[in-house]
Amino acid sequence: MRGTSRWTMPDDLVAQVNKLWERGEILSSFVSVAPLFPRRLVLKSPTASDLRDGFGEVRAWMQELRKTSCCRIVLREVRHRVHGANSLPDEVWIDSAEDALKLIARQKEAKRFLAILDATRQRQPMLLDWLARRPLRALEHAAEWDRFLEIVAWIRSNPMPALHLRQVDIPGVHSKFIEAHRGILTELFDIVLPPEAIDFTATGASQFEKRYGFLGKRTRVRFRLLDPRLTILPGATGPDISLDSKSFAEIDPGVSRVFITENEINYLAFPNAENSIVLFGAGYGFEMLRGVEWLSKASVHYWGDIDTHGFAILDQLRAQLDGVQSLLMDRETLFAFQSQWGREEKQASHDLPRLTPRECELYNALRENRIQMNLRLEQERIGYSWVEKTIRALL
């Protein structure tokens, strides 16, 4: 059948309706006031010349098309001088959502969605617009939908709860369930809660608790006392201490210098220094130091790798703490240990506005590969005596 490749076949009609399903339009029609059906489908039908040159093929095509259930075919009369008057398909219509669902065998999924829709209308009608926009997303979670509605009801009654997720007491819902579905719950909470009950600066799954006023895990700060005369824990000599950020902000050890280093071994082996402590850094991200007032009274020194990311972390730290000084991140140190140079796999390339002119000059040389391609000098490759000499010079 040569002509059928140009004419609409039953599979083409099914594909058109499947697209309506995949775009969520069929399910949305159950929520929306605007009707989707009756809907005319695209029909490519034989021309007069097709009828003249291949009457048998046209007749076979018509028979095949009539086998398509759930569609209404509108005919038009065509007269031919040889074959006389004939009725050819001119339009194909899907008259209802039920017919569309039957054509693509999606009745079971639609039944589940209608159950979701009915429950939402009764219990949380504020979410109906969301269902109209995201019907397939809702269908993915049909098994959990009742629990979602319970959680939504709870948060509406308890905005900004100041509780840990573990303390949310809803029958059939545990904290791990909420944690596992933070993405969709974010979409739902944003709809039902008033703006004053949402922290719009907190985004992403990791900040779900902060966004809606739950108590999250406190970030922790790990530090060591570098002066044996300093005491925070009675009886402990040179302890390796880890505190939540709130407690760290409240201790105020009264030190004059604070060192921050990214490498754990360097942190543990950091030389003793009078009236000083050393913090174990956390790479990108220094939120735990935000609001620690006593740090502003101390001289803060950051020691990172001499590579583009080391300087990027330094730049980010200065966004949290004014006046941070770099330590062992200079040309003299870099070239003193040329035999220890390594390779930075993926370089940072963005501008760093908080670097000093000397730091910026070295950073630019690194990111532009003016010294060596992808050059990197890791902290732990710097000789320990060089570290001790530098610390003594600072003191």
Image (tube, helix red, strand yellow):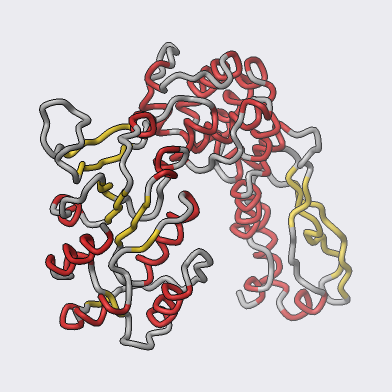
Q: Residue at x 36, y 27 (%)?
A: 176
Q: Residue at x 80, y 33 (%)?
A: 33
101 relative to 353 in the view: left or right: right
The front one of 366 and 64 is 366
178 relative to 52 in the view: left or right: left
The front one of 284 and 20 is 284
Vertical position of residue 370 compared to residue 54: above or below: below
Vertical position of residue 319 compared to residue 357: above or below: above
Q: Position of residue 26 (x, y in %)?
A: 67, 41
Q: Position of residue 342 (x, y in %)?
A: 22, 77
Q: Position of residue 181 (x, y in %)?
A: 45, 33
Q: Residue at x 23, y 65 (%)?
A: 390
Residue 86: quarter of image: bottom right
- Judge whether residue 204 can be spotted in this image: yes
Q: Residue at x 66, y 34 (%)?
A: 130
Quarter that holds the N terminus = bottom right
Vertical position of residue 310 compared to residue 109: above or below: below
Q: Position of residue 182 (x, y in %)?
A: 47, 34
- Judge whether residue 108 can be spotted in this image: no
Residue 103: quarter of image: top right
Residue 340: quarter of image: bottom left
Vertical position of residue 65 compared to residue 144: above or below: below
